[in-house]
Image (cartoon, rainbow, N blue to C red):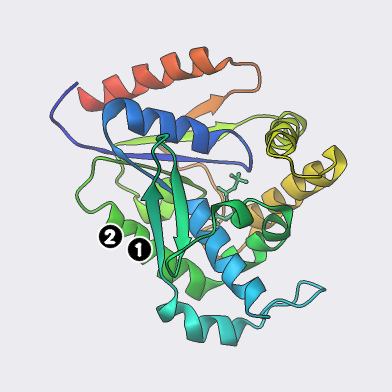
Amino acid sequence: MSDKKIIIAIDGYSSSGKSTMARALAAKIGYRYIDSGAMYRAVTLYALNNNMIDAQGNIDTSALISVLPSISIDFRPMPDGTQHTLLNGEDVETEIRQLRVSDNVSPIAAIKEVRAALTAMQRSLGKDKGIVMDGRDIGTTVFPNAELKIFVNASAEMRARRRFLEMSDKGDNVNYEEVLANVVRRDHIDETRAESPLRRADDAIDLDNSYMTHEEQDAWLEQQVNKALHS
Ligand code: CDP
């Protein structure tokens, strides 16, 4: 492995396996991993728990914007190599993955001030490089100069099936149709919002992992990292 430290941005559609891939890559090359989606999820949980989102999904945007400076988000490394998201010091890893949060996160992530606050945190986490960050706008907005940018996609059905299995394995009582509807709806909101929409950076490398095994994907990724480290 080279001494050169780079920024690796992994963007793509919901449930495309970005996080698993980014986390494994970071562990392998000794980089820090940051799940930027977890940060949007944590802000969404905060808004839900503080009655800033009503039952119809309407957001009290000005109330949320006014409390943004007092929301702190951190990551706690766990003995099994994963990390848990902390919201104002409290471990919220389980709650932020639930459908209640998934159903509300994309409208929250479309708010300009929320994006500005989280983008600033993400840039400061990456200031020393040596980081793998996954999300929707990492290669386009957060780190437009990242040395390696990957854009991941797979069919919506394949992605929903993976997410459904992951949630069922955890004991969440969800049905496939509900998960598919969430994936499709989030993709649409993420792609069409005005602020930093989900878009492939012009210099990103595409990865469609619909029919790839984890091993094939890891081998492919290792090749891309080696190229980026030695260019
Ligand atoms: O479910 P999945 O792991 O694919 O999504 P996530 O990475 O946890 O992100 C949840 C949501 O946060 C996305 O659907 C986006 O609305 C938003 N997000 C964003 O706008 N920008 C990012 N850099 C990361 C996530």
Which residue corresponds to the image point at 31% horizontal and 58% vertical from the top-left? 123
The answer to whether 107 appears left or right of 122 in the picture is right
Please give the residue where the numbered disc 2 appears in the rendered image.
Answer: 124
| Vertical placement of residue 11 versus 123, above or below | above
The answer to whether 228 appears left or right of 59 in the picture is left
Locate residue 197: give its quadrant.
bottom right
Residue 21 % position (x, y): 48, 30
Please give the residue where the numbered disc 1 appears in the rendered image.
Answer: 121
- Viewport quadrant of the N terminus: top left
**Residue type at numbered disc 1:** Met
Look at the numbered discs 1 and 2 and tell me whether their residues touch, using CB distance below 8 Å.
Answer: yes
**Residue type at numbered disc 2:** Ser
* Local secondary structure at mark 1: helix
Is the residue at mark 2 in contact range of ligand 1, meaning its CB lies under 8 Å from it?
no
Which residue corresponds to the image point at 40% horizontal and 43% vertical from the top-left? 78
The answer to whether 177 appears left or right of 213 in the picture is right
Viewer-nearest residue: 66 or 205: 66
The answer to whether 157 appears left or right of 131 in the picture is right
* Local secondary structure at mark 2: helix
Residue 28 % position (x, y): 33, 25
Residue 231 visible in the displayed image: no
Q: Separation of disc 1 and disc 2 at Cα?
A: 5 Å
